Image: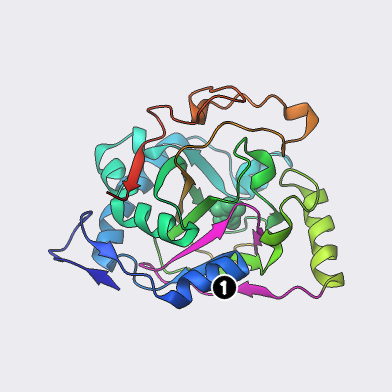
C-alpha cells in the first residue's frame, strides 16, 4: 500500500509498504507480484514520456513480418536508459519508492540503478525465451533484481513475464543468453524438475520483481495491442565488478551501463545513481 500524499500525477516522494509475506515470497520464489505500487494516474503520466522516447528510437523499423529472424525486436522493442533521455522519466525511474522496495526485498541498506529499459512487445511478437539475467551481468551477488512495471493493463494474451519459482536458489543453471537454445534448455529443465511456473495478468499500477538468478520468460503477444512495460534493474550498493559468472567469450565484460568499470573495481559510476539508502 502507498503511504503519503497522493495529489495525482507523478508523486515520487510517497513510499510503498511491503508486507512480510511479500518479502517471504520474493526470497522463497525469487519473484513477487506487488499490487498498487503506483496509482493509475502516475502510470498514465509516465507512460506518455516513455512511449514517445521508445517510439522515436524505433522510428522507421520494418513491419514485423519484414524483420530479420535474428532481430531482437521480434521479441520486444528494447531500449535502454530512458532516465537519461527525459527529466520526467528520470524522476519516475529514480523514485525512492521503487528503490526502497528493491532494498527491502533484497534486505540491503542501499541500492543503485544498473539500467532501465522499455520493453514494448508488439502484436505478433514472439515469446521471450526462458533465460536467467545474472549470467549476462558482471555483478556476481544474490542482490540484483528487476522491477517490471506495465504501462498498460497486461493480460495473459499480451505476454506478461512468467517465472519458474525457486530457480534463483541455484545461481547459474544453464546456457547464458536469451535465444532458442536457452528456451529449449530451460523448458526441458522446468518440465523434468516439475518446477511451478507463475504467469499472471498484471494491471497498470502493479509491478513484478524478480531476482537476476530466477529463470523467466514471457509468452507471445497474440492480443493485437502493444504490451508496454518498463524494467528497472537495481543492485546493492558497495559491489565490486565481478564477471566470474559470465561466459568466457564475454569476459572481461566491458559494460557501458556501469560506466565501463573493470573487474575488481567498485560499481559506483555516477551513471548508477544511489536511489535509496537507509539513513
Ligand atoms: O518482458 C519480457 O518479456 C521479459 C522481461 C525480462 O526478461 C526481464 O525483465 O528481465
231 or 173, nearer to the observer: 173
Q: Quadrant of ligand 1?
A: bottom right
Of helix, strand and loop, which one carries label 1? helix
Q: The N terminus is located in which quarter?
A: bottom left
| Residue lying furthest front | 279
Which picture quadrant has residue 3?
A: bottom left
Instruction: Measuring from the top left, give residue 225's x and y in whole percent.
Output: 49, 63
Task: Give the labeled residue for mark 1.
Answer: 156
Instruction: Measuring from the top left, give residue 239's x and y in whole percent.
Output: 52, 37
Question: Is 77 left, or right, of 44 in this rendering?
Answer: right
Q: Is residue 205 magenta?
A: yes
Question: Is 91 left, or right, of 80 in this rendering?
Answer: left
Answer yes or no: disc 1 within 8 Å of ligand 1. Answer: no
Q: Which residues are magenta?
A: 194-219
Instruction: Say few, some or many: other residues with alpha carbon within 10 Å of mark 1 (under 14 / 14 to 19 / 20 or more).
Output: some
Res. 23 in view: yes
190 or 263, nearer to the observer: 263
Which picture quadrant has residue 16?
A: bottom left
252 or 232, nearer to the observer: 252
For the point 54% across and 37% down, which residue is it?
61
For the point 79% across and 30% down, which residue is it?
248
Amino acid at each position: 500500500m502507498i503511504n503519503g500524499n497522493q495529489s495525482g500525477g507523478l508523486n515520487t516522494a510517497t513510499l510503498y509498504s511491503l508486507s512480510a509475506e511479500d518479502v517471504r515470497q520474493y526470497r522463497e520464489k525469487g519473484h513477487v507480484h506487488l499490487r498498487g505500487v503506483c496509482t493509475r494516474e502516475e502510470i498514465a503520466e509516465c507512460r506518455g514520456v516513455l512511449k514517445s522516447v521508445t517510439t522515436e528510437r524505433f522510428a522507421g523499423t520494418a513491419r514485423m513480418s519484414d524483420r530479420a529472424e535474428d532481430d531482437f525486436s521480434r521479441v520486444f522493442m528494447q531500449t535502454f536508459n530512458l532516465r537519461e533521455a527525459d527529466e520526467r522519466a528520470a524522476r519516475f525511474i529514480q523514485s525512492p519508492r521503487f528503490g526502497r522496495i528493491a532494498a527491502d526485498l533484497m534486505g540491503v541498506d542501499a541500492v543503485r540503478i544498473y539500467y532501465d529499459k522499455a520493453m514494448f512487445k508488439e502484436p505478433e511478437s514472439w515469446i521471450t525465451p526462458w533465460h536467467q539475467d545474472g549470467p549476462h551481468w558482471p555483478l556476481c551477488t544474490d542482490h540484483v533484481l528487476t522491477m517490471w512495471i506495465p504501462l498498460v493493463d497486461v493480460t495473459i494474451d499480451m505476454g506478461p513475464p512468467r517465472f519458474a519459482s525457486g530457480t534463483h536458489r541455484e545461481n547459474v543453471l544453464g546456457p547464458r543468453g536469451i535465444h532458442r537454445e536457452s528456451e529449449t534448455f530451460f523448458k526441458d529443465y522446468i518440465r523434468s524438475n516439475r518446477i511451478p511456473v507463475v504467469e499472471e495478468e498484471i494491471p497498470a499500477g502493479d509491478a513484478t520483481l524478480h531476482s537476476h538468478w530466477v529463470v523467466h520468460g514471457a509468452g507471445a503477444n497474440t492480443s493485437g495491442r502493444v504490451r508496454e512495460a518498463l524494467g528497472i534493474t537495481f543492485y546493492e550498493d558497495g559491489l565490486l565488478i565481478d564477471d566470474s559468472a559470465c561466459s568466457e567469450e564475454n569476459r572481461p565484460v566491458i559494460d557501458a551501463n556501469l560506466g565501463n568499470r573493470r573487474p575488481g573495481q567498485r560499481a559506483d559510476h555516477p551513471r548508477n545513481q544511489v536511489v535509496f539508502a537507509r539513513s
